[in-house]
Image (tube, rainbow, N blue to C red):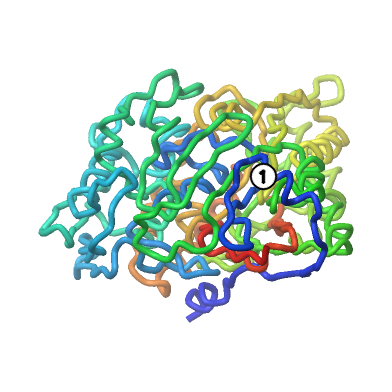
Amino acid sequence: MQGSLRRRLLIGGSVLAIGALALSACTSQRDDDGGGATGDVDSTFVFGASGDPPSLDPAFASDGESFRISRQIFEGLVGVESGTADPAPMLAESWEQSDDGLSYTFQLKEGVTFHDGTEFDADAVCFNFDRQNNFTGTAQSESLSYYWGKIMRGYADTGTSIYGGCEAASPTEVTITLTEPFAGFIPALSLPAFAIQSPTALEEYAADEVGGTSEAPTLSEYAQAHPTGTGPFRFDSWEPGADATVSAYDGYWGEQGQVQQVIFRVIGDTTARRQALESGSIDGYDLVAPADLGALESAGYMLVNRDPFNILYLGMNQADPALADPRVREAIARAIDKEQLVTQVLPEGTTVASQFMPDSVIGFNPDVTTYDFDQAAATALLAEAGFTEANPLTLTFNYPVNISRPYMPNPEQIFTNLQSQLQAVGIVVNPVSNEWGEYLDLIQGGADHGIHLLGWTGDYNDPDNFVGTFFGGPSNEWGFDNAELFSALTSARGLATEDEQEPAYQAVNEQIAQFLPGVPLANPVPTLAFASRVTSYPASPVQDEVYNEITLSE
């Protein structure tokens, strides 16, 4: 079956080069961090992160920097097979789905404890699921509980949640019920947002006491200083803008591995991250700039590619009246030369995107409607919509700064390239930039934005995680209400088999292409770079990379 083949073919990252360069500065600079050593191996691993985590509570996070740290501290009922996007047992050893597709019964691991000593059991599972379903007020905003709202379609007090309840039959058996079928439920549980957190810590540190507004939420004490899970590492400290540190949890139920401490050091600039690796002050970093690949490989550093399981897109917020006009949206699409964008500013190996999912996902439509680069057609469409040289279309163009994402390694360069292309057809661009956390809050939490750069790295291999997450219901990001599209996605996500999903999602992708809510741009190849002492790194297409699996040589 085609869908199954796609899932099987999505393998882990590939190693480009393994060097033997010795980093003479490594020991002295790392000693300053207080890293300990086991035998002859320095057991502290320092990772150069491109930005701060907006939240240490994974239920209130939706970004890669937060989830990178969450995956060290927390575990869910379901994980993924190493090097793939496919679901695998984690805190649940097995599960069974009811014949009607509405109930899932999980058999849980025994002898697992949270980092605060609380026992992991079925009651803890129910506490976590009930907690998210009962979020209210600001906690329901997309800038906080993004994934629960998208996957469960709402909350207890909205009347739209598909979460039907949780029942603990015994300490090691729990049943979660849905109110309607959802084929992607088990894969979705591998998301850090569904990680099981200590009920004791959640209550003690008032995890649900969030404030502010949806555009600018404020975090609880728990989300800033007390994240407590069952993972191989426990939280030590977080100094926003500088470092977050975790250390090995002695009571971990699984294999601990060599690494005893991890420091996530925030280095927003890609050049500065490369220099930190070269100086020996970090062991590795993500999102290597395309221009740096050749020099790093020649110098003997280990480069690891993740399979591109992502999408970079230009979003168009239809809360702006001009962007609500389909002629304007098509004009923007035809003004963009994707090949030029890929060739000039994105990593080698990046492919041009035709739709809002990579071709390895069920429902990819090889015959989808596309809007070829055509400046004359773009100008004509703008004129038809009432925008001419004398009365040009003026748009706010939002983009983030001081951040790199797997789907967007160099946002400033991508913005500059697209700005030039849009200006070439007479569109006046008003640039507005924000730091990453602020940017996400603006795009996901409010209506005051225009065209914008964003993207997605798939969290699990199911089409709902791409097009369902983007377009499954009304959203502040996109600003439209398309009942026909919402209905098609609701129907598709409830199908039980891949044979049924394939044609349904192909039809959905065509529907999205014709509606044109944004422009899918590219599927970039993310690359990581490591010091020679790193001999193995668990690269994952969904970034499910837990550092107890790293091996070190010195």
SS category of the residue bearing label 1 = helix
**Residue positioned 54% across, 54% down in the render:** 511
Q: Can residue 340 be seen in the rendering of this structure?
A: yes
Task: Judge the density around disc 1: few (<14), some (14-19), many (≥20) Cα neighbours within 10 Å.
Answer: some
Residue 230's spot in the image, x, y percent? 35, 52
Residue 328's spot in the image, x, y percent? 69, 35
Q: Is residue 197 above or below residue 306?
A: above
Q: Quadrant of residue 232?
A: bottom left
* In-front residue for pair 285/133: 285
Residue 54's spot in the image, x, y percent? 53, 33
* In-front residue for pair 416/275: 275
Q: Is residue 455 above or below residue 106?
A: above
Q: Is residue 135 left or right of residue 59?
A: left
Q: Is residue 413 left or right of residue 252?
A: right
**Residue positioned 25% across, 41% down in the render:** 199
In the picture of the structure, the residue carrying the numbered disc 1 is 31
Residue at far left of view: 169
Residue 519's spot in the image, x, y percent? 67, 46
Task: Name the residue type under label 1.
Answer: Asp
Q: Can residue 324 be seen in the rendering of this structure?
A: no
* In-front residue for pair 300/464: 300
**Residue positioned 47% across, 46% down in the render:** 70
Residue at far front of view: 39
Q: Quadrant of residue 300?
A: bottom right
Q: Is residue 203 above or below residue 289?
A: above
Q: Is residue 352 above or below residue 420?
A: below
**Residue positioned 50% across, 21% down in the render:** 216
